[in-house]
């Protein structure tokens, strides 16, 4: 039996005449459809776990090299800009593939989106590991690494957009916020995990440290490929959990037209997007900003229009950086701490004071915009309240009819 003791059913608007005991999933097949019972299924938690692990793995893949930028530069013999491209590619890829992911979710369903994200992320992580193999030439290593990062970047929108769809289709009203929170929080937790694992495993010039760290960081990606392929069997439950989940999604093009005309959407998009963009830029550049000040790589333990903004901010902030003086360069942990930076393509530390002030100003502007201009209209909550009101009104009318019949009867 798949239903647990706390699972329940709800009658649709207009009421239901069946007040009998709950039925298991196997019993649902023999129940007549006109009852339109609302059922929640225990398998929803497995799908949620798959999305959590996939989101966490993809975030770890994105930020792997940022906490160890100077050592990555040395290992692959590349300059600082190419190290930043490994993070930047996630924001670049999410712009066109964000629309693709939305279309796939609406057209082919949740399962297709999860499978596509899991396999792209898994193959991308495998290519990243291939780039460290001994038989690969030094000139080819970076391009194999970039190909792996690109595939993982393409997979990101397919999982980033999945939490709200999962919550709406599989979870009852009382659990939607929890499901959204758990699935969405996996992304920053993945960033935290990568910022702990990468500096802990790669803190010197040993050529075996980086490959070993990549295999450890890739392990959740390989696990979730198996879980999603064999465990996620359908996009929607056999019976919807609520009345709103039973409604058909709005066509993709119609949805785009509506949000394009919504003032509240643009205020929220640009303001929240600024925060995400600054967060992405700071996370990507944190190593490069702190190592000139004498912090070692272990410092990381202390720590989609949005993606377009992230691309702009990363490029602008890198342009705003200034060269360090000879005295500052002498104190830099980038130059002394790693002991590996050498050659024409070595990592060059810079002063990040001006970019930091620029991002502070952007976030302040974003917060003020939300406070002054954001006035939300929560249509889903209104729909649920309207449904509950209809149920109360229907019950009241039924009771009134019963009273009228009793009073008029002889």
Image (cartoon, grey):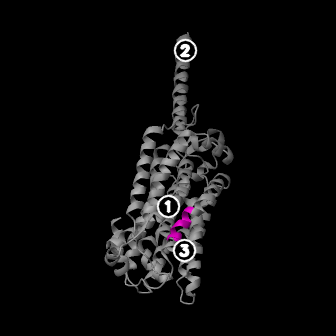
Residue under the point 53% across and 25% down: 393
Q: Is residue 127 above or below residue 111?
A: below
- Residue under label 2: 404
Judge whether 300 appears above or below 33 on screen. Answer: below
CA neighbours of label 2 inside 10 A, class few (<14), some (14 to 19), many (20+): few
Between the C-alphas of marks 3 and 1, the distance is 29 Å
Q: Earlier in the sequence, mark 1 or mark 2?
A: 1
Question: Looking at the image, is mark 3 or mark 2 earlier in the sequence?
Answer: 3
**Is residue 68 rendered to the left or right of residue 138?**
left
Kindly state the secondary structure of the residue where label 1 is placed.
helix
Q: Earlier in the sequence, mark 3 or mark 1?
A: 3
- Cα distance in 3D space between marks 3 and 2: 71 Å
Question: Mark 3–mark 1 contact, CB under 8 Å?
Answer: no
Q: Residues within 10 Å of mark 1 (few under 14, many from 20)?
A: few
- Residue toward you, 252 or 327: 327
Q: Nearer the viewer, mark 1 or mark 2?
A: 1
Task: Tell me if mark 3 has few (under 14), some (14-19) or many (20+) residues whose alpha carbon lies within 10 angstroms of its own.
Answer: many
Question: Is 133 a magenta residue?
Answer: no
**Could you tell me which quadrant the C terminus lies in?**
top right
Question: Which span is picked out in magenta?
Answer: 84-91
Residue picked out by circle 1:
316
Q: Residue at x 55, y 57 (%)?
A: 308
Circle 3: element type: helix
């Amino acid at each position: 039996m798949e239903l647990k003791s706390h699972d329940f059913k709800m009658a649709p608007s207009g009421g239901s005449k069946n007040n009998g005991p709950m039925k298991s999933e196997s019993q649902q097949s023999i129940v007549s459809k006109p009852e339109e019972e609302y059922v929640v299924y225990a398998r929803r938690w497995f799908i949620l776990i798959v999305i959590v692990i996939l989101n966490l793995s993809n975030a770890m893949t994105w930020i792997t090299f940022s906490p160890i930028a100077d050592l990555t530069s040395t290992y692959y013999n590349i300059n600082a800009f190419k190290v930043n491209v490994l993070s930047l590619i996630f924001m670049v890829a999410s712009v066109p593939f964000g629309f693709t992911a939305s279309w796939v979710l609406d057209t082919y369903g949740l399962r297709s989106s999860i499978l596509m994200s899991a396999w792209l992320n898994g193959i991308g992580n495998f290519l990243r590991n291939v780039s460290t193999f001994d038989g690969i030439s030094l000139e080819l290593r970076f391009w194999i690494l970039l190909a792996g990062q690109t595939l993982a970047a393409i997979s990101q929108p397919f999982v980033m957009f999945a939490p709200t769809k999962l919550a709406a289709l599989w979870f009852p009203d009382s659990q939607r916020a929890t499901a959204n929170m758990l699935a969405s929080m996996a992304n920053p937790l993945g960033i935290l995990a990568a910022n702990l694992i990468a500096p802990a495993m790669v803190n010197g010039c040993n050529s075996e440290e980086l490959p070993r760290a990549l295999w450890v960081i890739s392990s959740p990606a390989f696990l979730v490929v198996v879980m999603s392929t064999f465990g996620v069997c359908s996009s929607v439950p056999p019976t919807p959990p609520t009345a709103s989940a039973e409604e058909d999604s709005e066509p993709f093009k119609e949805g785009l037209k509506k949000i394009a005309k919504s003032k509240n959407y643009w205020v929220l998009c640009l303001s929240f997007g600024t925060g995400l963009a600054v967060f992405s830029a700071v996370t990507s550049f944190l190593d490069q900003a702190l190592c000139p000040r004498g912090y070692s790589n272990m410092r990381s333990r202390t720590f989609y229009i949005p993606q377009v903004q992230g691309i702009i901010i990363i490029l602008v902030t890198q342009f705003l950086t200034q060269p360090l003086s000879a005295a500052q360069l002498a104190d830099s942990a980038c130059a002394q701490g790693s002991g590996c930076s050498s050659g024409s393509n070595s990592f060059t530390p810079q002063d990040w004071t001006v970019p930091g002030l620029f991002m502070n100003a952007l976030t302040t502007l974003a917060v003020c915009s939300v406070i002054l201009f954001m006035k939300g209209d929560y249509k889903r909550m209104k729909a649920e309240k309207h449904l509950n009101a209809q149920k109360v009104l229907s019950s009241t009318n039924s009771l009134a009819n019963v009273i009228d019949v009793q009073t008029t009867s002889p």
